[in-house]
């Protein structure tokens, strides 16, 4: 009788371990093999709570997912705001899924007319883009076609080169 119980418990433990390993490998594969064809049609929110649709633009789109306590994210905001030439190529959105108070604080510190700060209240776009690192930069053409995903701090020159190459192709 004890032998049967040990075998059943061993099999259950084996299934649990295999299930956890499968889940970990699946998540890692999804992170490494991110793919999206076009910019999804999502409504996000401005810091005042009003809805904002990010797909209403005739320029390329640069989406930067950030966190307010991430120094690389703050450096990204500063660098993009100091380089006006990026706005010739694209509309830039800085998006966070953090509470709206954090967005208001960042927006008040970096008030820029060319950059739109948005809140992803339900994390729909966050999940659709599989955001794993901060900052994460997503580039889309004016036709909403996905160009490139860049993680970590990215120079404006690198962003512009990807956008310019896509316009030439």
Image: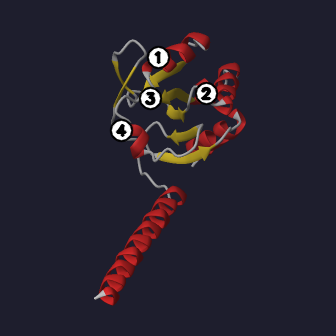
Residue situated in front as seen by the camera: 67 or 78 = 67
| Secondary element at tag 3 | loop
User: Which residue does the numbered mark 4 point to in the structure image?
Assistant: 124
Mark sitting on residue 50: none
* Mark toward the viewer: 3 or 1: 1
* Quadrant where the N terminus is found in the figure: bottom left
Q: Against 37, is 143 above or below?
A: above
Marks 1 and 4, the one that precedes in the sequence: 1
Q: Position of residue 122 (x, y in %)?
A: 34, 33
Marks 2 and 1, the one that precedes in the sequence: 2
Q: Against 52, is 38 above or below?
A: below
Marks 3 and 4, the one that precedes in the sequence: 3
Task: Count neighbours of disc 1 (C-alpha within 10 A) and say few if under 14, some if 14 to 19, many if 20 or more.
Answer: few
Mark sitting on residue 69: 2
Question: In this orientation, does residue 9 appear?
Answer: yes
* Mark toward the viewer: 4 or 2: 2
Marks 3/1 in contact by CB < 8 Å: the verdict is no
Task: Count neighbours of disc 2 (C-alpha within 10 A) and say few if under 14, some if 14 to 19, many if 20 or more.
Answer: few
Residue situated in front as seen by the camera: 166 or 122 = 122
User: Which residue does the numbered mark 3 point to in the structure image?
Assistant: 58
Q: Position of residue 139 (x, y in %)?
A: 53, 40
* Mark toward the viewer: 3 or 4: 4
Marks 2 and 3, the one that precedes in the sequence: 3
User: Which residue does the numbered mark 1 point to in the structure image?
Assistant: 101
């Amino acid at each position: 009788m004890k032998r049967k119980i040990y075998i059943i418990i061993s099999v259950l433990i084996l299934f649990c371990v295999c299930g956890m390993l499968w889940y970990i490998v699946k998540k890692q594969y999804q992170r490494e093999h991110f793919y999206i064809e076009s910019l999804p049609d999502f409504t996000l929110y401005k810091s005042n709570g009003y809805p904002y649709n990010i797909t209403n633009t005739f320029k390329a789109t640069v989406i930067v997912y950030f966190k307010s306590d991430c120094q690389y994210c703050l450096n990204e905001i500063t660098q993009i705001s100091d380089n006006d030439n990026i706005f010739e190529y694209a509309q830039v959105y800085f998006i966070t899924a953090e509470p709206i108070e954090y967005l208001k604080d960042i927006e008040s510190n970096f008030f820029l007319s060319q950059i739109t700060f948005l809140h992803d209240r339900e994390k729909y776009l966050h999940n659709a883009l599989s955001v794993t690192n901060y900052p994460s930069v997503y580039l889309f053409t004016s036709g909403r076609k996905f160009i490139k995903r860049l993680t970590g701090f990215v120079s404006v020159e690198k962003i512009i080169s990807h956008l310019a190459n896509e316009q030439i192709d």
